[in-house]
Every structure is written in C-alpha cells, then in structure tokens.
Image: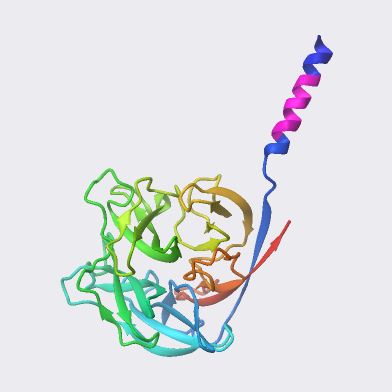
Amino acid sequence: MRTSLCLAFCVLAAIAHAETPTLKTVTVAHSALGGIGEESGVMRRDPSDVIKVDDLYYVWYSKGKISPGYDATVWYATSPDGHDWTEKGMALSKGEPGTWEGASVFTPNILVAEGRYWLFYTGTSRPFGKGFNPDSKIGIAVSDSPDGPWERLDTNPALANSDDPEQFDSHLVDDACLIVRNNEYWFYYKGRQLGKGPGQTQMGLAIAKHPQGPYVRHPENPVIPGNHEVLVWPQGEGVAAMIGTTGPKNIINSVLFAEDGVHFSKTHRVVKGPWAGGAYRPEAFTGSGKGELPEWGVEIGRARGKKGGLPFIHRFDVKESQ
C-alpha cells in the first residue's frame, strides 16, 4: 500500500513538472550613447519607443531641469545607427497655464498610422513643489512629418483618469504605449488609484478604431496587476510586455505574453532589465503577426554616485537564452 502511494505521488509530481512551462531568460546590457546622454544641468528621461523613417531612427523624450520630469517639455532626436544621436529640438511645449497640461508635458510615445505621426504624451496641471501630488492625463498631437510641426487634437485629453474612485486609474494615467492589432489601435498605459502609491501602479488597456480615438477602456482592466513602466510589443499573433521591478513578486523582472493581448502569463525571466525603456519595434504598427522580442532600445540612465546628477538617455541591448 505504501509503495503504491509513493508511486502515485511520484507520477503526479512528474505530471505537474511536465506541465510547468520552462522559462527562458532575457539578459539586458546597458551602454552610453552620444548626443542625448549625460549632460550637466540637463534632465532627459522617459524615452518613447524608437521608430525608423527612411535612414534615420527617431526618439522623443522628456527634457527639463528637475529629476522627476514635472517641469518638462517634449524633445526629439535622430540617429543613423541607434548609438550616436542628434538632438533636433522641442517637439511639444507646455499647454496654456491653468490647463490639464499647463505645468508639464512629458512621457511621450509615438504611433504611425494612416500616413501620419501621432505623438501621445502625458500632461500635468500642478506646478512641482512642496507637497506636490501629481495629476496626469494623456493627450495626442499629430503631424504629417516626424519632424513636426505638431498639432494638438481638439478632443484632448485622449484618456483621463477615471471618475470612479474605486478604479485602478482614478488618480492618474500615464505612459502610453501603442500597437496596431486586429485593425484597431491598442493603447496600453499605466494607472494609479486614489490613495495608492507609485509601487501600486498597474497597467490598463484602451482600444480605438481610429488613431485619434475615441479610446475605450477594456472591461477587464487592469490587464497587468503591476509595472511602473509600460513596454509592450506584438509577439507573433499575441502581445508581450516587459515588467520591471515594481509589482507583485510573481511578475517582476519578467516578460509576460498574452495570445489575446489581455490575459498575460510569464514566459521569460529578465536580468538587469531597462529602466523606463522604449524599444525599437519594427512590427508594432504593421499588424503582420510577425513581431519578435525587441533587440534594442533606449531607457533612462542614472548618474550613479553623483549627488544631484540628473537622468539622461541610455541604450539597452537584449539577448535571449534558454
């Protein structure tokens, strides 16, 4: 009898082990880049995903003079190789004083659709200072060229914080990340509930039939119960997301995958992942079903060991292994 029980337990354990998916590992290397790297007295952070137009890569980012970015405007740079960049100038200024975007515009991202360029950005209304508590909404500006000029949509903000205090995004919304899926525009973002701290940020999804919206929140939000940065890309027919160091222990430092773009599960461990990364995702807007793990991107760099050092733009490269 004892032998039979032991045999049964061994069989069950073997079955359970066989059904547990083997996780691959993603290792990230970090390196300096030229032109928009560390610079005394200048803050650059929150880079967008990278796009390629003709022979140049483009990236947008927050630029200002204080570390958290709540005084920023949106700037952009170009590069022939993804290593050496040329800062081209301001893409988007602050909104009118007293408006939802009057204090700062930052955390940009880009969508290419219908032959135009759609710059998503976060705006805040409150000036940074003692007792500051951020409010934020997400707007869109559009241009016929990646070099601008950019025209804000009259329908802004495209996504505001929820009016329901019980919702995960009732305090703020931030950090847009766009892909094209099923001929629709999938807008992943992070949100925080009233009364919650940054460590309790979660990820949501809104979908539109047109790049300008209207964007409708997914009924199963939040789609990922954590993550302070939003880095999403098409992975084959599904969607993958890289999760940083913020969130439940079972998902941090990982890559998650969802065949339907909504119900995510872990596929990779991530070693030394990017901080607020923006990736080069060549299939992000094609709807081709051929998207793969990004090979490189840009991120926030930190001036380690330097008191008062401001963030800057850094490069990361990705390697996948078993």
Q: Position of residue 70 (x, y in %)?
A: 32, 70
Q: Residue at x 59, y 68 (%)?
A: 294
Q: Is residue 10 above or below residue 290?
A: above
Lateral position of residue 70 relative to residue 126, left or right: right
- Furthest residue in direction right, as rendered: 3
Lateral position of residue 40 relative to residue 219, left or right: right
Asked whether 38 or 173 is in front, the reply is 173
Q: Main secondary structure of the magenta part?
A: helix
Asked whether 268 or 302 is in front, the reply is 268
Using the rendered image of the protein, determine whether residue 167 is visible from the camera's viewpoint: yes
Q: Give the residues drawn in magenta, as a range.
A: 7-16
Q: Is residue 104 above or below residue 230?
A: below
Q: Is residue 317 above or below residue 83?
A: above
Asked whether 41 or 314 is in front, the reply is 314
Q: Position of residue 315 (x, y in %)?
A: 57, 76
Q: Position of residue 38 (x, y in %)?
A: 50, 82
> Image quadrant of residue 255?
bottom right
> Image quadrant of residue 320?
bottom right
Lateral position of residue 133 relative to residue 32, left or right: left
Asked whether 191 or 302 is in front, the reply is 191
Q: Residue at x 76, y 31 (%)?
A: 14
Lateral position of residue 1 relative to residue 66, left or right: right
Q: Is residue 19 above or below residue 183?
A: above
Q: Position of residue 104 (x, y in %)?
A: 28, 73
